[in-house]
Image: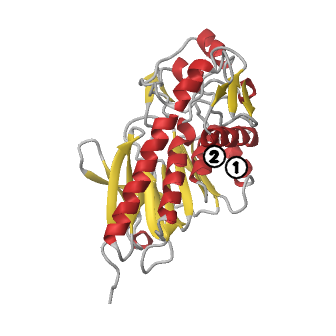
Amino acid sequence: MNTHSEPVTLARQAMATRFEIVLHGHNPVALRAAGEEALDEIDRVESQLSLYRNTSEIAHLNARAAREPVRVSPALFRLLEQARRLSAQTNGAFDITIAPLVRCWGFMGGIGQMPTPEAVAQARQSVGMNLVELEPENFTVRFLREGVMLDLGALGKGYAIERAAEILRQDGVNSAILHGGTSTVHAIGHPPGVAAWQVAIARPAENPPGLSGVAQGPTCFPAAAAQESSTASQTNQDGRQTHSPLLAVAPLRDESLSVSAVWGRCFQSGDRAYGHVIDPRTGQPASDALLAAVILPSATETDALSTALLTLGPAGLGQIAGLRAGTRCLVLSHREGQLEAQAIGLECLLS
């Protein structure tokens, strides 16, 4: 006999995506209250980190830090310190000073455009964590040259989900899953009756990066359905359900999974598609991989490191896996007209 109540599901639009939470337990009223509190925390994080809100801490910092040291909240300062460590650990493949290059390529609020080589070279001069001075004694931040701009988009959703999960745990939730769009998912405990949450990564279509028809992101399976399925349901632009073959299925228990991919925002120039993920080291859109996925306890870290792995490509798989004990990761590339997947700690279903 099943003694578990129906799960409580909540959703909210934030950070230009849809966040969803599914909670299991015996007190639906308490679960809903905890879920609403967690979603409120996501809203708070967006108001703090958004590059596009003039009232956010990040917007305030970007406007002033090249002229004078700017005091920020302790929480934001710790996040910036974490971003600096992640940048160093990935040899600059992840870098929150990427904003000048994102703007140069037309992806800051736009769909992209081809810049001149001179514009890229100029933007690169304002990119690099060596241009950001963090003073821990006073929680101040200073930019060492004009033009530096921070963009926390490559870890913001992960950080928001991590903060929301902390709220849920503090409220006594021990079985839940929450995700932000198709990029990051975090599992708390496990669903009733099964050992782990099963999260699928859909396999893209057999076409070059950035072109139409490519499936997206992680899909959460109800209960143990993933064990019996080789496809993931996706909703297309017309609202119809489609089924995509799977690239991998990841069991998660008190862990996060982030997926970064070159599709989404992209534009075509000539016979090549250019995606919105820019390599901070070269100033060019990432092109060595189609998709990268990383699993770790911290959603902030998986969000950042999946971006770094996408930028590094297959050559960076061992480097990213070696950063933390127990890291599971996967990278998908396009070689000679065929999809090629490499993974550590995950079984690839690519045939």
Residue 289, visible in the rendered structure:
yes
Residue for point 51% across, 61% down: 349
Pinpoint residue 320: horizontal percent, then vertical percent: 70, 49
> In this picture, is 284 found above or below 72?
above
**Mark 2 or mark 1, which is nearer the start of the sequence?**
2
Is 334 left, or right, of 33 in this rendering? right
Circle 2 is placed at which residue position? 305
Pinpoint residue 67: horizontal percent, then vertical percent: 66, 15
Is 86 left, or right, of 183 in this rendering? right
The kind of residue on which mark 2 rests is: Leu
- Render colour scheme: secondary structure
Assess whether mark 2 and mark 1 are in contact (beta carbons under 8 angstroms): yes
> In this picture, is 173 found above or below 307?
below
Circle 1 is placed at which residue position? 320
Residue for point 36% across, 61% down: 33
- Kindly report the distance in space between the C-alpha atoms of the residues bearing marks 1 and 2: 7 Å
Residue for point 42% across, 39% down: 15
Mark 2 neighbour density, 10 Å: few (under 14) some (14–19) many (20 or more): many
Considering every residue shown, the one lying at the far front of the view is 138
> In this picture, is 68 found above or below 39?
above
Residue 350, visible in the rendered structure:
no
Out of 182 and 298, give the one closest to the viewer. Answer: 298
- Quadrant of the rendering where the N terminus is positioned: bottom left
Badge 2 marks a residue whose secondary structure is helix
Out of 344 and 157, give the one closest to the viewer. Answer: 157
Pinpoint residue 215: horizontal percent, then vertical percent: 40, 47
- Residue 117's quadrant in the figure? top right
Badge 1 marks a residue whose secondary structure is helix
